[in-house]
C-alpha cells in the first residue's frame, strides 16, 4: 500500500468530502492547510456539473476556503475537453444548468435547444433546471442514434442531515428506460478524467491520490486510473456500506479530519 506522505497531489471530491450542501465538513479547512503547509497541492475534482468553476470558487470562499479556478476541475470541463478532441464547434443538445450551458458556449460549442435539428451530441449533466420538454427532446435524439454523453454517473447528490437530490445518474436511468440507451460517461469513475488532469497540469499519476465519499465514482476512479484511493464516510458512503461492498479503497477514514495525521 502506498504511503500518503509520499503523494504530492490530492484530487479531492467536494460534495460529501469537503462540504455538504452549504455546510463545511468538520476539519476540512485544517486538512487543506496541512496539504499546503507541506508544500503539496490539491485539486478539487467534482462530478457536479451543475455549477461553473466561478460558482465553486465563490462557494468555497464563502465557506472560508481560499481557492482559485486552477484548483477546480469539474466533470463539465472534462466533457468539453473530450468533445473538443472529437469535434470542435459541435452542435450539442444539452441537458444542463445555465452555468453548464455557458461553459459549453465559451468553449466554442453551439447549444441547440429545439427538437428535430441536425446535431452532433446529446449531453446530459446534473440538470437542476430539467423540464419535460428537454427530456423529451433528448430521448428523441438518442433514440435516433445521436451520440449520447453524460458528464458523470452519480445517482444522488448528498445534502446535510442525510438528505439528497437526484443526480445525473438517476436522470440517465430514466432516459435508458425510455430509449434503451446508456451514455458514455466522461467524468469519474473513468480513468480519462485523471489522465486529463495529468495532461493539463503536467502531473505524474504515481504522485496522485483520489479522495472522496462515493465508492462507485471516487474510489473506482482511483482503481480505474491506477492511483491511490481514499474513501471518507462523511457523505454518501457510510461505514456499513463499505463493509459490504466489493469496491475497496487503499485507505478509509471517517472524514478528511482523520487524514491529517496521515499526510
Image: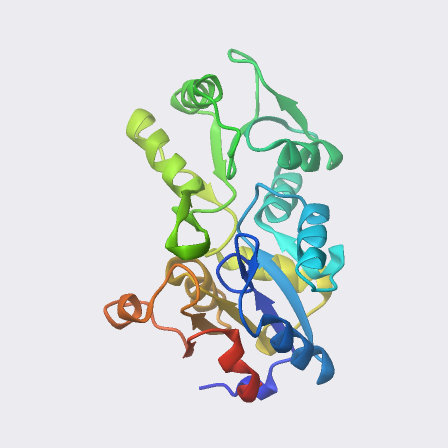
Which residue is nearer to you in this view: 151 or 259? 259
Question: Residue 217: x percent and y percent?
Answer: 43, 58
Up/down of 57 relative to 117, above or below: below
The quadrant of the picture occupied by the C terminus is: bottom right
Question: Residue 191: x percent and y percent?
Answer: 50, 59
Q: How is the image coloured?
A: rainbow
Up/down of 168 relative to 25, above or below: above
Question: Residue 177: x percent and y percent?
Answer: 29, 30
Determine the image quadrant of residue 32.
bottom right
Residue 75 lies left or right of residue 163; in this view the side is right
The residue shown at (54%, 56%) is 192
Residue 239 at least partly seen: yes
The residue shown at (65%, 46%) is 81
Hey, which residue is sitting farthest left in the picture?
244
The residue shown at (47%, 16%) is 133
Question: Residue 113: x percent and y percent?
Answer: 58, 18
Amino acid at each position: 500500500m502506498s504511503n500518503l506522505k509520499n503523494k504530492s497531489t490530492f484530487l479531492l471530491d467536494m460534495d460529501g468530502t469537503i462540504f455538504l450542501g452549504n455546510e463545511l465538513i468538520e476539519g476540512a479547512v485544517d486538512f487543506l492547510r496541512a496539504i499546503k503547509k507541506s508544500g503539496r497541492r490539491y485539486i478539487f475534482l467534482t462530478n457536479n456539473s451543475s455549477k461553473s468553476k466561478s460558482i465553486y470558487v465563490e462557494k468555497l470562499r464563502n465557506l472560508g476556503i481560499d481557492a482559485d479556478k486552477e484548483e477546480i476541475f469539474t466533470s463539465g470541463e472534462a466533457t468539453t475537453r473530450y468533445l473538443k478532441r472529437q469535434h470542435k464547434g459541435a452542435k450539442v443538445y444539452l441537458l444542463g444548468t445555465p452555468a453548464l450551458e455557458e461553459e459549453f458556449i465559451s468553449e466554442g460549442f453551439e447549444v441547440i435547444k429545439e427538437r428535430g435539428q441536425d446535431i452532433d451530441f446529446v449531453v446530459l449533466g446534473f440538470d437542476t433546471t430539467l423540464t419535460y420538454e428537454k427530456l423529451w427532446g433528448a430521448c428523441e435524439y438518442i433514440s435516433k442514434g445521436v451520440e449520447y454523453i453524460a458528464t458523470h454517473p452519480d445517482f444522488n447528490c448528498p445534502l446535510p442531515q442525510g438528505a439528497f437530490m437526484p443526480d445525473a445518474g438517476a436522470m440517465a436511468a430514466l432516459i435508458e428506460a425510455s430509449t434503451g440507451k446508456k451514455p458514455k460517461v466522461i467524468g469519474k469513475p473513468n480513468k480519462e478524467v485523471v489522465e486529463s488532469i495529468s495532461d493539463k497540469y503536467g502531473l505524474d499519476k504515481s504522485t496522485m491520490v483520489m479522495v472522496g465519499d462515493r465508492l462507485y465514482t471516487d474510489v473506482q476512479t482511483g482503481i480505474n486510473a491506477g492511483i491511490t484511493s481514499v474513501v471518507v464516510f462523511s457523505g454518501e458512503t457510510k461505514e456499513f456500506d463499505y463493509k459490504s461492498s466489493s469496491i475497496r479503497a487503499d485507505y478509509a477514514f471517517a472524514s478528511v479530519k482523520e487524514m491529517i495525521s496521515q499526510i
